[in-house]
Structure formats: C-alpha cells, structure tokens
Image (tube, rainbow, N blue to C red):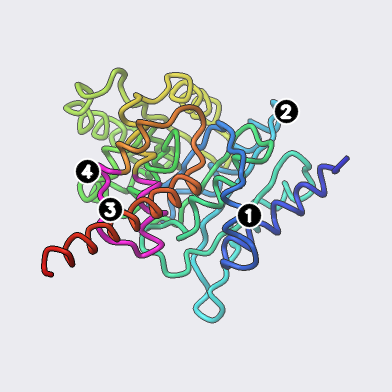
Amino acid sequence: MTSSAEHIKLLARNISLVENESGDYKNILKNLVIREVPVIGITGAPGAGKSTLTDELIKVYSEQGKKIGVLCVDPSSPFNMGAVLGDRIRMSRWFNEPNVFIRSIATRGSLGGLSSKIIEITDLLRAADFDRIIIETVGVGQSELEIAGLADVTVVALVPEGGDEIQTMKAGIMEIADVFVVNKADRPGADNFVKNLRQMLAPAFSNHEEEIEVIKTIASSGEGIPEMHHAIEKSLNAGNINERKLWLLTEKAYVLIQQERMKGITKSDIKTGLQKTSGTINLYSFAEDMLIAFKKASSKTKNTTAENFE
C-alpha cells in the first residue's frame, strides 16, 4: 500500500514534470481520473492580503479535518524563471501538517496572473485526495479574469484605500467575483468603502439569483474569516448554472488545444463536442480527440480542394 507521504512525493514530482513539460507528462495527464473537488480562487490587487486570507482559510478547513491543496502563483525570478516562494514563507506553519499541501507555481511570463500550466496542475490536485483546492493568484489587476474559468468560487480581495481601483476593475473583476472580501477593515474609511462597493454592485444584482456577499475582514487577527468561509461554502453549495459551467469547460479545453498551436478550431465546435459527452470529462483526452478529428477534417478538405483543381 502506498503511504500518504509517498502520494505527496508522487504528486510533487508529477507537478514538476507537467510544469517543465518533461518526461511522459502528456500520458500522465491523459490518464488522470479527475474528481469533482471544489476549487476556490483568491484574487485581487497586490497588497490586499491574499496570502494572509489564504492562510486563515487553510486554518478553518484544517480544523475541520479536511485535506487542502494550495497553489500559490508567485512572480517568476528574472534569473531562473522559478517561483520567488514568498507565499510559502508566509504559510510556514503548515509545512509539517500532513493534510495540507502547498506548492508555489511561477508565472513564467504569463500575463494573466496565473501560470501557463495552472489548468493541468489544478487537475493533478483534483485527481488526488484533497477535499478543497485553493488557488492564490499573483495579483495583476483586470487580467486576473482568467481565474473565473478555473475556480468554482472566486474571492476578490480589496482594501479600503482601493476606491479608484474599483472604478478600474468594475468592467472586469466585478463581474466574476462570487464573494468580495474587504480586508484590513480596521483602516480608516472601511465602512464607507463597503457601502460604496455595495452601491456599485447593486445594478448587477438583477443578473444573479443571489446578491454577491461583501465581507469585512482583518485577516491578520482572524476577524471576519468565519464569515468569509461561510460565504464561500454557501456559493459552492449553490452550484454553478449548467450553461456557465459548460462555457468554463469550453474555455479550459480551448486553452489546451490552443497550446498545441492549432488554428481553425472554434469554441463553438468545442462546446458542441462537450455537450455530446457524459460523466466526468478528462479534458486532455478530449482535447487530443478534437485535434485528431480536426486534422482528419483538414486533410479531407485539402484533398477535396486538390481534386477540384484537377
């Protein structure tokens, strides 16, 4: 029987293979048995306290006896493209906790606040025996919209001084947040900031079955963390609208296919293909099947064109 420690070593090794595109990483991905594990994304501007919020959320789940997988997307070193590892230093109290797995992932030049291999690495964690997966992004502003296509619940962290920032993000991040957290709420102007945020969100509430919750926290002291946890679990239990989930899967599959530098496959084609499947979908096998079908179709088109010119 394989021990828990050996499972973790295998997971860490497979993440390195996928991140570096080494060894037999493609077969590893295609043979994954992916489980339905809730993925929680924590995003927001730099300095909003995302790492501290993540650390406190780990504490809540750990005290409940849940196994937690955490991916901290760090800025890349300009010298070796590796992760700077700042988040793991701040979360050092979990190093010897057997139910917590923390991995720093370098952006390696990715502009969206996430690693270019984040989809694959997240699915490696989903294939493991975790109860919750938490992904903390670098924090680069509006381009963090891509976290919405990866997480089941997206938490956007803000600070009371971010009034101008809200205006900038309104057309983007404001639309993808499932929970807003106003951290460092002990700072001056926090109550007024929350009031303005709720007023700004009010026109959008008509498009949601339930209002988006705005939670005040002081993560450094743990204040408001139970409320944040409750809001996250409430959003998870509400479930995603089928059409929205289908489009999120479409986005993921499109990225996988795009990585193979194939042109001519539309997202509508992918969505149609996904609608024909049933049960849990392994996107790596699905993407390869789409590529094979596209190549065959392209070959037939070329042959027909050649015959027409003869």
Element marked by disc 3: loop
For label 3, the residue is 265
The circle on residue 290 is: none
The secondary structure that dominates the magenta segment is: helix
Residue position for label 1: 103
Amino acid at the residue labelled 4: Lys
Side of 85 relative to 234 (left or right)? right
Which sits earlier in the primary sequence, circle 4 or circle 3?
A: 4
Relative to 31, 241 lies left or right: left
**Residues at marks 2 and 1 touching, judged by CB atoms closer than 8 Å:** no
Q: CA distance from mark 2 to mark 1?
A: 20 Å
Earlier in the chain: of badge 1 and badge 4, it is 1
Residue type at mark 2 is Gly
Q: Which residue is mark 4?
A: 170
Q: Residue at x 29, y 52 (%)?
A: 142
The answer to which of marks 2 and 1 sits earlier in the sequence is 2
